[in-house]
Image (cartoon, rainbow, N blue to C red):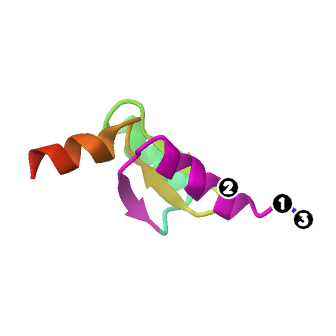
Amino acid sequence: MIDHRRRQLDKASREHRLLLQKDVTFEQFQTNAKAKRYPTGSTYAWAAECVFGPINSAKEQSNAA
């Protein structure tokens, strides 16, 4: 059986996406996205209930530190 949660987390890791928020429902994600509380290109991982930033946002974060 496919573990969608693990698959989505692995994909976000491969794309170097920064974890922005955990335990978010899809409705909350939609509301926050419409209010522009997330950067453009952020995605919602429905199985993990997490919001990830744009591609390579984790690399940019580590370079800034």
Question: Could you say where residue 62 lies in the image, as x and y percent from the top left?
Answer: 20, 50
Q: Secondary structure at mark 1?
A: loop
Kindly identify the residue that appears in the image at 10 percent across and 45 percent down: 64
Residue 34, image x, y percentages: 40, 36
Q: Does the segment drawn in magenta span residue 8?
A: yes
Q: Amino acid at mark 1?
A: Ile
Q: Quadrant of the N terminus?
A: bottom right
Front residue of 34/41: it is 41
Q: Label 2 belongs to which residue?
A: 7
39, above or below 8, in the image: above
Q: Which residue, as the protein is rendered here, is positioned at the far bottom?
A: 23
Count of number-bearing discs: 3
Q: Residue 59 is drawn in which quadrant? A: top left
Q: Which residue is mark 3?
A: 1
Q: Is residue 40 visible?
A: yes
Say which mark, if any, is on residue 47.
Answer: none
Q: Nearer the viewer, residue 20 or 62?
A: 62
Give the spatial CA distance, label 1 vs label 3. Answer: 4 Å
Q: Are marks 2 and 1 in contact (CB under 8 Å)?
A: yes
Residue at 31% in and 41% down: 57
The kind of residue tagged 2 is Arg
Residues at badges 1 and 3 in contact (C-beta under 8 Å)? yes
- Looking at marks 2 and 3 on the same chain, the residue that comes earlier in the sequence is marked by 3
